Image (cartoon, helix red, strand yellow):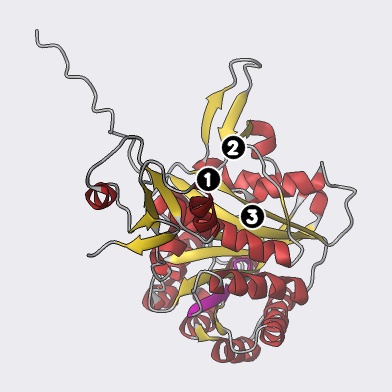
Amino acid sequence: MTAPSPANPALLPARLRDLLPPDAETEALAVEALMAVFSSHGYERVRPPLLEFEDSLLAGAGAAVAEQTFRLMDPDTHRMMGLRPDMTPQLARIAATRLVNAPRPLRLSYAGACVQLGGGGLSSDRQVGQAGMELFGPDSPEADAEMVAVGAEALAALALARVSFDLTLPPLAPALIEEAALPPEDRAPLLHALDRKDAAAVARHGGRLAGVLTELLLSAGPASRALAALRAAPLTRSARALTDRLQDTVAAIERASPGLRLTVDPIEFRGWRYHTGVCVTVYATGRHEELGRGGRYVGGGGEPACGLTLRTEALLRAAPAQPGRPRLFLSPGADRAAAGRLRGAGYATVAALSATADAAGEARRLGCTHVLQGDDPVALAP
């Protein structure tokens, strides 16, 4: 019987990958640029653990991400634990427990990796990087607008200025369907049709809601057009309260960030199911991949909260390529003071560990762009 061949040590589980040079450093620098913007607006950084006990990780808003959670048993306590698929529920737990007595508004920021069973509908990757901010306490259009304004500034720090913020109301379509008392057999097909933006199927399954839902479906686009359609739509009192809040939030965003590209999709309801009010999805102009999403939800103890989570891998795919750090080759005996000064100026120094007769050739072999000669870096000829 033939023995099985040894496993390829480079083989990883499906949809998991190594991040290699220079991409890993590029990602780290991008995350720190985002976090610096969050910090400059008063968002204090926290670092929740990658693993938590299942009953706390999936409590409250965390219940909405249960289907995306990897589970394993703690060998010490024999209690089930979960790998976080999303960091927002963890921030809600921290705000409601460890920081319950902190002054409100409470502004927190975070960055780290999450693990999702199926990519969370946002990515084919199982491991996704997140960097974001959460605002606990106020329930106001101004709080919603701050998420968008600070998010836009953070994206600009990565040279992502041409972005679009797509505002949605996830509770609106389900609320209209519930209040209209549509037959149960029509509800699932109608939600499916709305999700697929299928106007013909909406008309077929919408019953007395068919007209208004079709009109709202077709109104998606620039904020002014969608808001006009919402104002003209015959809505119930509770639905009108949702759309009025959306309109007030758009006005607050326009005051905080004049000129920002805003679109509105009134009946879009995809996303994490813990969102309860105005939500936002971020896109780079000309690209279909989501850069991030966020919105209003209920934190621990019923506390109002809103946030924005950016996807670091998607940001790097959309952002303009940044020049790498120049690499400076140091021959044996190179001036240490000069090397230190140049590291402070942004060079990465690569020291030779043995004598070489061809410094330029060795420098090229190690991926260097410069060689230190005396006190000065000399660029290598292409």
- Viewer-closest of 214 and 372: 372
334 in relation to 227, above or below: above
* Alpha carbon separation for disc pair 1 and 3: 20 Å
* Alpha carbon separation for disc pair 2 and 1: 8 Å
Marked residue nearer the N-terminal end (3 or 2): 2
Q: Position of residue 207 (x, y in %)?
A: 50, 75
Say what amino acid the circle numbered 3 marks: Tyr
Labels in figure, total: 3
Which residue was labeled with disc 1?
113
Marked residue nearer the N-terminal end (1 or 3): 1
The magenta span reads 162-171
Which residue was labeled with disc 3?
274
Residue shown at the point (49%, 82%) measured from the top left: 220
Which residue was labeled with disc 2?
50
Marked residue nearer the N-terminal end (2 or 1): 2
Give the overall secondary structure of the magenta segment: strand
